[in-house]
Amino acid sequence: MHSFRTVPDIRIANGGAARLDAHIAGLCANKRICIVTDKGVRALGLLDGALGSLEQAGYDALVFDNVVADPPEAIVRAGAKSARAFGAGLIIGFGGGSPMDSAKVMAHLCGCDQPLTDMYGVDKARGPRLPLMLIPTTSGTGSEVTNVAILTTGETEKQGVVADALYADRVLLDVSLTLGLPKLITASTGIDAMVHAIEAYTSLPQKNPLSDNLALSALTKLSGAIERVCKDGGDTQAREDMLIGSMLAGQAFSNAPCAAVHALAYPLGGFFHVPHGLSNALVLTEVMKYNLPNANELYGEIARHLKLGAGGAALVDEMARIIDATDVPQTLASVDVPSSAIDMMAKDAMTKTRLLINNPREMTYDAVVDIYEAIA
């Protein structure tokens, strides 16, 4: 038996954020909204149109912009406390994966009394939450359509809250919010989305016909757009293809979860604050090479779909080519991760069993060390 779940209401509207009042109809009875974002998004002015439209429509908005990359528990708790004190009737996550993940957990914390520490794991988050809307400003995480939130616990450890209660009530995709993204963020988040699709397609325990088709559709859009948009950041059609491709990949991996690429990427973010998309790009091709003996058929199906030729190696080569063509860093040294940290990171990666169980080939400590050393 297969099952498939996703967000019930997805809207695609160029310029939609500037008409946000029209897109939140029915979600916020008390007209008090908490918008969760980060200082970078706020400084770029991406929220200005949305806030203006809400004010004109008679809404009161609290902007919680203290979210940082790899959001720590303390910040999410503080945001929930602020939203409760404000009396928010709707939580909106506005930004990349970190603001959206934070918003998911904040909505849950504001809607019930379950402690955050009891939510980590799969299907542990229980109880009601506040209405939740998500608006991505990057094309990579797919967080707007997933039931996953990743937070930093303690100093470096990352843990996930995975529960259907985290699916948003509504999503708004507005390509205009992505037009100013720098090339490195565009490239690394786009590769992140491609990783989501590839890992969903090879997620053996839970892959299903719907997730497979979404993953392939995502890769068609992403592979056709990523180099175009890196050459011309103002290419609106390519930007929209990236945004929709990222969402499709998010729907795929939310139902057929990610695997070893993510498990090996997490220590880079947890210990050294390497952005998540870039972490995935760094380890991607070496993990794929390791998986190839078991994943050749599935990688080959993707390669044929993308008209790359026969055999799984064609997909590995193509991902390496895209990473090179988009000028994404390719070594640990280039992102200031010392080779002396490999043992520590490998031990941490091996604790990510939630992800490793989905990998097409069993991952070992020695293999993780070899992969890190190959990109040192």
Image (cartoon, rainbow, N blue to C red):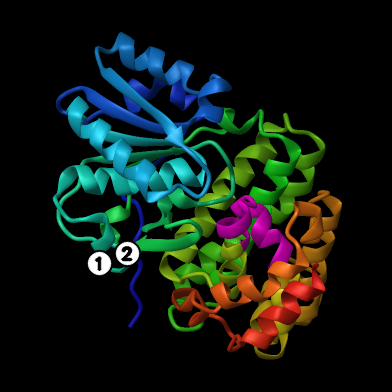
167 horizontally vs 108: left or right:
right
**Residue visible at 75% across and 54% down?**
336
Task: Work out how far the residue at label 2 is from the one at label 1, CA to CA, in angstroms.
Answer: 6 Å
Q: Nearer the viewer, residue 173 or 120?
A: 120
**Residue visible at 17% across and 28% down?**
87
Give how far across and how far down residue 19 sits, in percent: 40, 20
Q: Is residue 164 magenta?
A: no
Residue 169 is at least partly visible in this image: no
Q: Secondary structure at mark 1?
A: loop
Rendered image: mark on residue 150: none
Q: State which region is magenta.
A: 268-283
SS assignment for the magenta stretch, majority: helix
Give how far across and how far down residue 346 sits, in percent: 62, 76
Task: Say above or below: 196 vs 98.
Answer: below
28 horizontally vs 103: left or right:
left
The residue beneath circle 2 is 120
Inspect the image, locate mark 2, and give the three-letter code of the amino acid beneath it: Tyr
Rendered image: mark on residue 124: 1
Q: Nearer the viewer, residue 134 or 268?
A: 268
112 horizontally vs 13: left or right:
left
Give how far across and how far down residue 237 sits, in percent: 67, 36
Q: Is residue 275 magenta?
A: yes
Inspect the image, locate mark 1, and give the three-letter code of the amino acid beneath it: Lys
